[in-house]
Image (cartoon, coloured by chain):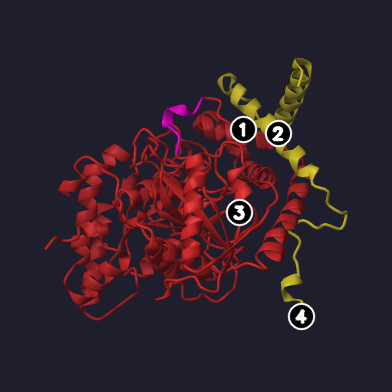
Chain colours: A red, B yellow
């Protein structure tokens, strides 16, 4: 009988074996470390591997589980953190020369929850510099590469998180999403990404890019894995001023594998008529919509305000807030920033106070359209993630602008929860993705829809073909 | 946009950057100017949408979710 390789076990499957005593966290961790040692030189997903800490955490988890202490669904499960999450005593660089020697004294709130839940930290993952630059070759670490084709972009800025999960180096990685930085890498790398509702997961101890747009969340191999991660990391944090004091629901999708009774809004023109929309993306979205209808969902085609309006609103807010964060260093240490980061941050100096206020006024109006018009009548919105598959890494010019073929910013502007799921591959073998947008704090419905679709499709069973991977 | 218009706009950007204390390294100027033009376009796009004077910014605390409608 063929044995499932350890990295292909879901978090729930690995957890069941850990509790049954047929698998140890040490074995799971050593397997992951071996894959990282063999494959990461090709992918550059990690900026730091915390081998000794991981093995110590794993040994502790094994001892605790054996002695009847169960800390929850991630107990004994390896994970990685985007390198903007503070880790006490462990270097946290933001992938930047400016933070090359930064060793935080305290853990980010999410990291503290993961540690308390008995999870095993394998290391820190590549990001675009300060979650805004990149993909860059002028930083202390190289950019991560897409496991489906290493000449192509992973998406960003949670680039290492997407690459590591897609390649099976980890089942779970934490990312952050200010304009699509969880959903972009999830879509381009063919994994699941969840941007929770603004306020659902604490941002404390995560280096800020844009205070009112930043969201923390998981990238995982499957919807179920993402749901288990949410069960551990969600919850009110009185030390994060944006944290919402709302109850943490059961994120598990449950046994329902049909979508009867759900009404979904499809803004087809939003992506299909957008400049640069790839016919492959449109065809994959059409097929995914048909699959959702076969599962019992009622689909209504709707019209949203144009994506450019959401993007402009989000970019003005992001750039103004990010400039406020970085102004001093941009003045005093300009050349310590990578070229792309510098070029994206400095234009914030040319925005005016009225520009920002107008963006914030528009933000409320756009959120009202999504929440009071569309989601008042529908359980979720389904739309494309990116308009085209991942571009080549060498296609970025030195003077690259903000233009990215993503449709993710609208839901940073509105703060709604969004689950990104794979919906197929381009003719060139690159992943394509869909967004499932829910009502505020209704991640469970997004996860239910994603889990039903994932079970009906087969994308989660496909793995990138990487040299040496079969041997590990 | 004419060359003169572009030049005038870039002069305006230079003044705003200088006011903020930013001295752009010469080899990054083209990329920064591209970003500034894009910001100016974004600022124009968000003014395209007509909003009444009573339309409040999103960072003004809203009681709407807590107002009883029954």
- The kind of secondary structure element at disc 4 is loop
Vertical arrangement, residue A313 with respect to residue A89, above or below:
above
Residue B43 point in image, percent of width and height: 74, 39
Q: In percent of the image, x 49 and y 62: which residue is there?
A: A292
Q: Main secondary structure of the magenta part?
A: loop
Residue A431 visible to the viewer:
yes
Q: Which residue is mark 4?
A: B68
Vertical arrangement, residue A61 with respect to residue A129, above or below:
below
The foreground one among A77 and A378 is A378
Q: CA distance from mark 1 to mark 4?
A: 50 Å
Which of labels 2 and 4 is toward the front? 4
Q: Please identify the quadrant where the N terminus of chain A is shown.
A: bottom left
Please identify the quarter of the rendering in which residue A367 is found. Answer: bottom right
Q: CA distance from mark 2 to mark 3?
A: 28 Å
Residue A427 point in image, percent of width and height: 39, 39
Highlighted magenta segment, given as a residue range: A390-397
Q: Earlier in the sequence, mark 1 or mark 3?
A: 1
Identify the residue at the far top of this view: B3
Q: In percent of the image, x 55 and y 77: which residue is there?
A: A247
Vertical arrangement, residue A295 with respect to residue A358, above or below:
below
The foreground one among A135 and A210 is A135
Q: In percent of the image, x 77 and y 49: which residue is there?
A: A357
Task: Report whether A310 appears left or right of A334.
Answer: right
Residue A408 point in image, percent of width and height: 57, 49
In the rendered image, residue A393 lying in the magenta stretch gets the answer yes
Pointer 3 local density, CA inside 10 Å: few below 14, some 14–19, many at least 20: many
Q: CA distance from mark 3 to mark 4?
A: 28 Å
For residue A412, the mark is 3
The chain containing the residue under callout 1 comes to: A
For residue A331, the mark is 1
Judge if badges 2 and 4 mark residues of a common chain.
yes
Q: Could you tell me if the residues under marks 2 and 3 are in contact, i.e. CB atoms within 8 Å?
A: no
């Amino acid at each position: 009988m063929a044995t499932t390789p350890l990295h292909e076990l879901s978090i729930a499957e690995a957890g069941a074996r850990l509790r049954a005593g047929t698998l140890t966290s040490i074995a799971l961790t050593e397997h992951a470390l071996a894959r990282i040692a063999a494959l990461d030189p090709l992918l550059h997903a990690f900026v730091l591997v915390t081998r000794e800490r991981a093995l110590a955490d794993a040994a502790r988890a094994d001892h605790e589980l054996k002695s009847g202490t169960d800390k929850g669904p991630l107990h004994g499960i390896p994970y990685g953190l985007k390198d903007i999450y503070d880790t006490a005593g462990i270097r946290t660089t933001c992938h930047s020369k400016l933070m090359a020697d930064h060793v935080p004294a305290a853990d980010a709130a999410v990291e503290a929850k993961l540690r308390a839940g008995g999870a095993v930290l394998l290391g820190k993952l590549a990001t675009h510099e300060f979650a805004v630059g990149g993909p860059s070759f002028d930083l202390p670490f190289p950019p991560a590469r897409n496991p489906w084709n290493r000449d192509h972009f992973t998406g960003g800025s949670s680039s290492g998180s997407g690459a590591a999960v897609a390649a099976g180096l980890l089942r779970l990685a934490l990312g952050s999403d200010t304009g699509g930085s969880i959903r972009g890498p999830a879509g381009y790398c063919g994994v699941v990404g969840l941007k929770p509702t603004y306020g659902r997961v604490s941002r404390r101890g995560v280096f800020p890019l844009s205070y009112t747009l930043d969201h923390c969340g998981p990238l995982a191999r499957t919807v179920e894995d993402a749901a288990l991660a949410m069960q551990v990391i969600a919850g009110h944090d009185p030390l994060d001023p944006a944290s919402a004091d709302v109850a943490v629901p059961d994120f598990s999708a449950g046994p329902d594998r049909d979508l009867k009774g759900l009404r979904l809004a499809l803004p087809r023109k939003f992506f299909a008529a957008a400049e640069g929309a790839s016919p492959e993306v449109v065809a994959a979205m059409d097929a995914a919509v048909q699959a959702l209808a076969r599962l019992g969902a009622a689909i209504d085609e709707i019209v949203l305000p144009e994506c450019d309006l959401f993007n402009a609103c989000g970019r003005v807010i992001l750039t103004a807030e990010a400039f406020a964060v970085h102004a001093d260093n941009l003045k005093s240490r300009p050349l310590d920033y990578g070229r792309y980061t510098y070029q994206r941050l400095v234009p914030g100096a040319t925005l005016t106070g009225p520009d920002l206020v107008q963006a914030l006024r528009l933000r409320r109006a756009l959120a009202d359209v999504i929440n009071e018009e569309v989601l008042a009548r529908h359980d979720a919105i389904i739309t494309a993630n990116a308009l085209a598959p991942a571009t080549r890494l060498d296609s970025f010019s030195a003077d690259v602008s903000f233009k990215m073929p993503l449709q993710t910013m609208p839901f940073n502007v509105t703060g709604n929860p969004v689950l990104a799921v794979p919906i197929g591959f381009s003719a060139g073998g690159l992943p394509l993705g869909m967004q499932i947008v829910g009502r505020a704090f209704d991640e469970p419905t997004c996860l239910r829809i994603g889990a039903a679709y994932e079970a009906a499709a087969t994308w989660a069973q496909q793995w990138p073909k990487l040299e040496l991977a079969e041997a590990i | 946009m004419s060359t003169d218009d572009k030049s005038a706009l870039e002069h305006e950007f230079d003044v705003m950057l200088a006011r903020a204390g930013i001295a752009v390294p010469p080899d990054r100027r083209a990329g920064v100017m591209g970003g500034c033009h894009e910001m100016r376009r974004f600022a124009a796009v968000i003014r395209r949408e007509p909003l009444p004077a009573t339309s409040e910014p999103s960072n003004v605390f809203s009681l709407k979710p807590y107002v009883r409608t029954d």
